[in-house]
Image (cartoon, grey):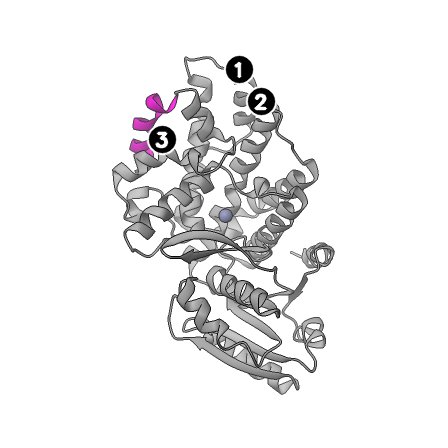
Amino acid sequence: MENYQDIVKLSQQFGINAEYASEAFYPVFRASLAGKNILVLTDENTVRYGRPFASRLADAGLSVSLYTIPEKEPVADEKTCALVAGRLAPYDYVLAVGAGTLNDIAKYTTFHAGKKCGVLASAASMDGFTSGVTPLIKKGFKITENAQTVSDILIDFDILCAAPKIMTGAGTGDILAKFCCLTDWKMSHLLNGEAYNEEAASLMRVALGQCVDSIESIKACGRQGIDDLMRALLISGYAMVIAGSSRPASGAEHHMSHFLEMDFLRRGERIPLHGVKVGLGTMVSLRMYKRLKDLREDFEGKETAVGLAEALPEPEWVAGVLSSLGCPTRFSELGVAADTVRDMLFNCYKIRDRFTIMTLYNKFGFMKGAADELMDLYY
Ligand SMILES: [Zn+2]
């Protein structure tokens, strides 16, 4: 379990203080904030962690206030960002108590206000903790905005292990997706000569391997598993910095997720958890890789692609892991129409000019022969 020291050191290289809960109550974090005005930012769900945390900071002599966004599940949109931004003037530092959304709001608003921020993670649910950009919803569209990375990430296993199971499932989906991201990238490197960064890829691959080794513990939301999962989620952010792009952490499964997000936004509906959609996309990508060897058609680089596919896990294995964590294994469970999912299979590769298994199927005309099977399996 004691992976603490190496992730702490690695984080330092990226200017981030990753600090674990202990008797000493985050001494590095506290020392860096002496004499500063701190705002602890929560929503109605995470205030149960934020309030006692703020009291302990105050007891330790720090100047601290608490603000709770008056919603159980806020969305990172213009309205919520404006609400938070309007309260920042008296403070030097914002500590978000949450995961994706709260972290995004804090990173974005403090960046524009010229202040620093950190996060007390409430769930191991996604890999955006250490990312310097943030997804926001503006005028009904999801866009990626410049933000800053957190200065501190505070990790308390008592909190992470108590998170709703599906949030751990979402984080697991975002990590198991790396099988596909890394393979999409490697395939593009071998077939198209796209630049590839072995340092970033191997850092991600090792962290992913540790999660696979601990998969039973992750499924049980045990400490060892959550430790390896959280570590991999942080490393994912660092691998992107090393690669200078999101390649090590985002492939066709993320394009599928983005495609569906646009549909949810168009319909004005709440978007399902990122990692839940990405987990479904991972099953589709893995199936597409696995069926390459049975394709009658030939294409340049087929042998290479089939070889890469052999090293991948079976999609059924991923489905088993994610369903035991309360995640759906069919798109229909998300509340999305069959036509939309079919449309996704044929068009999501256009979202970005990035070669993936989806690009390969669509550009070479293989999707026509695969779509019915994929719909049967995953819709
Ligand atoms: Zn992701």
Label at residue 346: 3
Which quarter of the rendered picture does the C terminus lie within? top left
For mark 2, what is the residue? 191
> Image check: 348 left or right of 208?
left
- The residue closer to the viewer here, 132 or 200, is 132
> Image check: 79 left or right of 333?
right
Amino acid identity at mark 3: Phe
Q: CA distance from mark 1 to mark 3?
A: 21 Å
**Label 2 crowd bin: few (<14), some (14–19), many (20+), radius 10 Å:** some
For mark 1, what is the residue? 300
Q: CA distance from mark 1 to mark 2?
A: 8 Å
Amino acid identity at mark 2: Leu
Q: Earlier in the sequence, mark 1 or mark 2?
A: 2
The residue tagged with tag 3: helix, strand or loop?
helix
The residue tagged with tag 2: helix, strand or loop?
helix
Q: CA distance from mark 3 to mark 2?
A: 21 Å
**Residue 180 versus residue 214 in the image, above or below:** above
The residue tagged with tag 1: helix, strand or loop?
loop
Amino acid identity at mark 1: Glu
